[in-house]
Amino acid sequence: MQRLKPAHEIYNRLLWDTSCVPGGEFVIGYEDRFLGIQEKSREEFEAEEVPFHRIRYFKAIQNNQKLWDREKRIDIITSSYKNPNSSDDSILITSSIIDSEISREKKSKIADASIETNNDANDNNDKPTTIISTKFKKQQIKKKRQAFIEKSKMEARLELEQEKHIEAEHESQRLSKIREVEERIKRFNEIQIK
């Protein structure tokens, strides 16, 4: 049994050989650590700098058919791997059935979401929608880390200043006690001499 081709090889193949994709356009299904499975176009995928090990499938846009799927072990692009549990025909049929069901679910979710957004749009016309990318997340984490470091440095400086102030007070008290003792000794010596 042959191994399934890795995602980066399939991705490179899709880039240089557009004849293996109906219509020449495809989407990439990948696993986001926070949001779960996401679908992005090639441009969006490259902009977010998602690592290849997170890719779960490649799907043709024109017929909505999965060309390569890691979990279902489907590789239609290179035809080098066949799922041992089923024949090629059943792979294509089940893949297209599942994809059509998923697309129906997505369309219904999009329709529901558009209704909700239309209602929300009337309420919140001035609120922009936020799009968070991996670079943005990294920048935010970096800013938070730098702010934490600056805060820690400031707290350490304040603590050091307080310690110096307390040390100076103790030193001045010690010197005043020493002067007081010296004066007492001097007075005692004067009394003894008389």
Image (cartoon, helix red, strand yellow):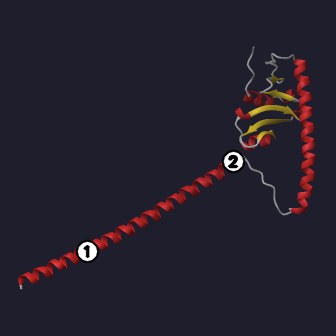
Residue at numbered disc 2: 135
* Among numbered discs 2 and 1, the one appearing first in the sequence: 2
- Residue 74's quadrant in the figure? top right
Name the secondary structure under disc 1. Answer: helix
Vertical relation: 96 (above or below) 117: above
Residue ID at (85%, 29%):
66
Give me the C-alpha separation between circle 2 and circle 1: 63 Å
Residue reaching furthest top?
A: 1
Q: Residues within 10 Å of mark 1 (few under 14, many from 20)?
A: few
- Residue 176: give x, y in percent of width and height: 27, 76
Q: Is residue 143 left or right of residue 16?
A: left
Front disc: 2 or 1: 1
Q: Is residue 44 visible?
A: yes
Nearer the observer, 133 or 182: 182
| Amino acid tagged 2 | Lys
Q: Is residue 63 visible?
A: no
Name the secondary structure under disc 2. Answer: helix
- Residue 171's quadrant in the figure? bottom left
- Residue 165: give x, y in percent of width and height: 39, 69
Residue ID at (69%, 47%):
135
Residue reaching furthest bottom?
A: 194
Residue at numbered disc 1: 177
Residue reaching furthest left?
A: 193
Q: Residues within 10 Å of mark 2 (few under 14, many from 20)?
A: few
- Residue 169: give x, y in percent of width and height: 35, 72
Vertical relation: 41 (above or below) 166: above
